[in-house]
Each structure stands twice: as structure tokens, then as C-alpha cells.
């Protein structure tokens, strides 16, 4: 099982940008698909993005497509979520998660390892 630690959250005005990072432990980072999820107060945790182990494939939720992008640096065991054109409705706790294997799942049930989350607040 891989250990995950997110960073980079904060308070930003609408239209601004933030980059989240997720550092992973372990020597087999490239064998994990990495997902990003978010949870707003009173709502279910929802899928944001996922990236394959090689970094060559990505999938995004419709709500963030064109504004968010995910990437990874396997030499640093780190995955990133670049968030641009932020909106107040993007306010949530953002989590990274790891899933062994190659399938780009959108389901949180398929991810076994989770970070502690980082708060993103977008003011209007």
C-alpha cells in the first residue's frame, strides 16, 4: 500500500489558479493510476481526474475539463493537479488516491490508498 500526502491547497479568488501536489511513498509509484477526488460540505466525494501510471493517459470530470490538468513525475513519486479558472463551486477538500494497475477508473471504490486531503477555497 502506498502512503500519500497532499499539499498546495489554499484560498484563491475566482478566476485564479492553484497547483496541488501529492507525494507518494514506495518504489513502485509508476505502477499506480493516480486519481483526484473532491468533497464539498454536505456532498458526496466526487471524481475530478485520473492519470495512468506512465502519465500518458488522463480522464477528467466534465465539470473541470478544460480548466484542470493532472500530470505526474515518476522520478519524484509525485502527481500534480493544476487548477485554472477556479470557480466558487470548486471549493472542497481535494484528495489524491492510488489504484494499482492500468485501468483509469472514476470510481472512488476502486482506489485503496488515500491522502489526508487539502482544502481549496475559492472566493467570489
Image (tube, rainbow, N blue to C red):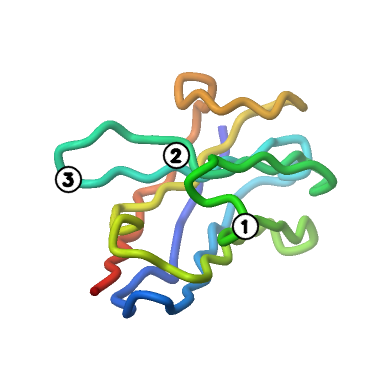
**Left/right of residue 90 with respect to residue 50 in the rendered view:** left
- In the rendered structure, the answer to whether residue 52 lies left or right of residue 63 reads right
Give the residue at x 72% y 57%. 72
Front label number (3 vs 2): 3
**11 versus 35 height, above or below:** below
Q: Quadrant of residue 59?
A: top right
Query: Which residue is label 2 attached to?
Result: 114
**Residue located beneath label 3 in the image:** 41
| Residue placed under numbered mark 1 in the picture | 66
Q: Position of residue 84 (x, y in %)?
A: 52, 70
Asked if residue 42 lies left or right of residue 46, the reply is left
Q: Secondary structure at mark 3?
A: loop
Q: Is residue 28 left or right of residue 41?
A: right
Instruction: Pick whichever of labels 3 and 2 is earlier in the sequence.
Output: 3
Residue 53 - label: none
Local crowd at mark 3 within 10 Å, few (<14), some, or many (≥20)?
A: few
Is any part of residue 26 visible from this angle? yes
At 47% from the left edge and 73% from the top edge, which residue is drawn?
18
Residue 17 at x, y percent in the picture: 48, 76
Rendering quarter of residue 76? bottom right
Q: Residues within 10 Å of mark 1 (few under 14, many from 20)?
A: few
Q: Secondary structure at mark 1?
A: loop
Spatial CA distance of label 3 from label 1 is 24 Å
Amino acid at each position: 500500500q502506498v502512503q500519500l500526502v497532499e499539499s498546495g491547497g489554499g484560498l484563491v479568488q475566482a478566476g485564479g489558479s492553484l497547483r496541488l501536489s501529492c507525494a507518494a511513498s514506495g518504489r513502485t509509484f509508476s505502477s499506480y493510476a493516480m486519481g483526484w477526488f473532491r468533497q464539498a460540505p454536505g456532498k458526496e466525494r466526487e471524481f475530478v481526474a485520473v492519470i495512468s501510471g506512465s502519465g500518458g493517459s488522463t480522464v477528467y470530470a466534465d465539470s473541470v475539463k478544460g480548466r484542470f490538468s493532472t500530470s505526474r513525475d515518476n522520478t519524484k513519486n509525485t502527481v500534480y493537479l493544476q487548477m485554472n479558472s477556479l470557480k466558487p463551486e470548486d471549493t472542497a477538500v481535494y484528495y489524491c488516491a492510488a489504484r494499482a494497475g492500468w485501468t483509469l477508473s472514476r470510481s472512488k471504490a476502486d482506489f485503496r490508498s488515500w491522502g489526508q486531503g487539502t482544502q481549496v477555497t475559492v472566493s467570489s
